[in-house]
Amino acid sequence: MTYFLQQLLNGFQLGSVYALISLGYTMVYGIIRLINFAHGDIFMLGAYFGFYMLTRLKLNFLLAILFSMILCAVINIIIEKLAYAPLRKRNVPRINLLITAIGVSFFLENFTSLKIIFGPDYQPYPRPFKIITFNLGDLTISSLQIIVFLITLFLLLLLEYITKKTKIGLAMRAVAYDKETASLMGINVDNIISLTFALGAALAGAGGVLYGICYPQIHPFMGVMPGLKAFVAAVLGGIGLISGAVLGSFIIGIVEVFTAAFISSTFRDAIAFAILIIVLLTRPQGLLGKEEGIKL
Amino acid sequence: MLLRIENLNKSFGGLRAVKDFNLVIQEGELCGLIGPNGAGKTTVFNLITGFYKPDSGRIIFNNQDITNLLPHEIVRLGISRTFQNIRLFNNLTVFENIISAFNYQLDYSNISSIFRSKNFKEKEKAIKEKAYQFLKLFELEKRTSLLAKNLPYGEMRKLEIARALALNPKLLLLDEPSCGMTINETLALMDLIKFIKEKFNLTILIIEHQMRVIMGLCERIVVMDFGEIIAEGSPQEIQNNPKVIAAYLGREYAYH
Amino acid sequence: MINLYLIKIFSYACCITISALGLNLIYGYTGLFSLGHAAFMGIGAYLSALITKSFCQYGYLIYFLAIILSTIFTFLISYLIAIPILKLKSDYLGIATLGFGIIVKVLLDNSDKIFPQMGGSRGMLAIPNFTNLPIAFFSLILVIIIMRNLIFSKFGRSLLAIREDENAAYALGINVYKQRLLSFALGCAFAGFSGSLYAHLYCFLHPSNFDFLRSIDLMLIIVLGGLGSMSGTIIAAFLWVFILEGLRIILPQAILDWRLVIYPLLLILLMLLRPQGIFGNKEILWLKEKILKKCY
């Protein structure tokens, strides 16, 4: 029982990080129907930015997260303006946008692998604070888990506030629902799209730093699998929905940890996708998604 | 009796789109289906052609129960349709659009396609010739290599009707064919419909909003509102029916 | 020496082209977004290698038999998988096939637990070298002929109709679901065929040869060539293989890693400058369809 609860906590920890990545996927998909393959690499960049700020600049842990978030947001806006916006303007089919995203992803991964940039080797991540463990009966809870969870919760609530209670959030939801009409209402669609990219990147950046601290090995291709799984989580919960992304992420995180703990570590990647396929076949709109009908 | 619809019902969530719909269509009829927007007319078409499954009721075509058949099976039994918002294959040429309609009548196997057997070559040549003659019938033969999306609107409608006819149907369902047309185009359309009914020995059920088309073409009219039939009869009877006027014809009548 | 190397690369290009033509059938012509194509190559590759390694005393006879059997097996298995999966809509189909690809890779990584000769994540060694240039080349010609003859027949026309508008295709009497199944299975059979040729070319198989990154490579090739153009796929596949290899030869050792940075930048540039791909949807030479003269 204790082992079960212990793994549940680990699952929540992993799920929190996935949630931070997954939100970027779901928001970008919701607004321009793009599966942003490069998002996992923004996560990776966040981890590296945090690394350099913690080791070279010896910044405070929370400041490192904050600056990492800002840097990732800025980079994502630049990528959006340079690579995606020009294609969107020309009304190209969606597959071209997808290929561009793949190109950006490959570029980020291989560029950062160059020895003069970050280098291809695994880098050990610093632990910027002392980790205390508490005991609740037989259960061991580490302060790291609590901090990860609290930071994630804070960022989620912040996002929820921005999207539901601010005018800009309303604009974001309007554009996601119907781009053309939103522009007729005086909303600057391009800026809203850039903002969406920025918000998603900021969250992924925070996720990167947290991931680095929890699982202290980073390397340029570290974003591939977590990115994919976070995307699966977003689809599982219902793509385009913030609540869906969060729910899906925790499910995937917990399932992955349980698979590693109770079955075998080698199957942890496959299990997430197997679950996804089963859910898609029975409920294609995702767990929290709404069914879409076509008008004939 | 070619088509018999018995007690058809269809709901979408809480909305009852079609309620206790009963209709009989005799062979050779040209029957009109009218009603305000949202009355359920296109839903009836979708139910007949198998795109929706009814919640209850039966559809009997040529003495065969087609209620639960799939769309492509219903086509092969002899019902074809056009769509309200033209569904041509936009990025294919006019010729490719027409010849896709002849596909299901071709009966060579894929293996003979791969080996280019004599059977295959003969059938392909025949079908391409047939498709070309068909286009000629509709005066579209000069447009064969034009992409469907680049056709003028009136010709798009013509192509869609031609394509539906290429399927060799006994019953043709036309969904608002004069939508978006000028008066001249509409008159030409009416002539076209009369022509194809003669030439192809068709029974036609047509959804329309333009009164000149309905009154000019149809022998019998069925009026729907809120999913139900509220009146049925000849054009004269419908024009004088107070329920119909109240639901629909009232404002329109002022223009005529 | 350099001649042997070129011959091998050319044979490899033939294999990749066969697989890409399969994906072109699935996505370019039928519009089915499949991101797991490389997994079917892997299935064909590993199965054929198992057969030839177990019965290598029969020489070329068992080689040809192995290829035929693994192609048929790939056809059947992809058909079975397609039955539930093709009910999903475009983007979800992509995710499901992506997931399938990852599950296959994980299974291959653990394959040595059941079939020790498959080598699991250590890879499968010592596969007899039966594939030579004539075999690879004539296989490619065979596939091109089959594809061309199928495309310019009622089968090909129904696929194009389905890609353009599924509902209109139904209304034309086309059994959309069944045609999609057939197209998918056929395309995957080509992938299996190509995989079995590949296995006996480089004589070594590793699960990472068939992971989702390889599936993405194939997707890139058919988009770059022009979706729905056989000529485009063939040219793009050869260009892709030779340019990537070519860059490896001409770039000096010091900046060799930049090869993988230049490649995605070229990709992004191509998407910006020529989104319809090299050939758009046109064909050249004998691959052009014979239309009635008067239809011009």
Image (cartoon, coloured by chain):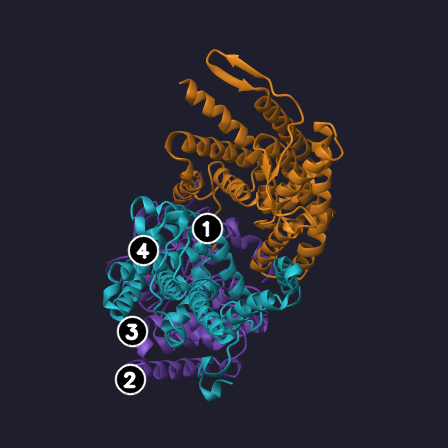
Considering only vertical position in the picture, is B213 above or below A160? below
- The answer for how far apart the CA atoms under marks 4 and 1 are is 16 Å
Q: Are marks 2 and 1 on the same chain?
A: no
Pointer 3 chain:
B
Query: Residue type at mark 2?
Result: Lys
Query: Residue type at mark 3?
Result: Ile
Query: Judging from the image, what is the letter of the chain drawn in purple?
Result: B
Pointer 2 chain:
B
Pointer 4 chain:
C
Query: Judging from the image, what is the letter of the chain drawn in cyan?
Result: C
- The answer for how far apart the CA atoms under marks 2 and 1 are is 42 Å
Can you give x and y, in whole percent of width and height, for residue B89 in the image? 49, 68
Question: Dot 3, crowdedness within 10 Å: few (<14), some or many (≥20)?
Answer: few
Q: Quadrant of the N terminus of chain A?
A: top left
Q: Which mark is residue C77?
A: 4
- The answer for how far apart the CA atoms under marks 1 and 3 are is 31 Å
Q: Nearer the viewer, mark 2 or mark 3?
A: 3
Q: Which residue is mark 2?
A: B118
Q: Which residue is mark 3?
A: B111
Sequence-earlier tag: 2 or 3: 3
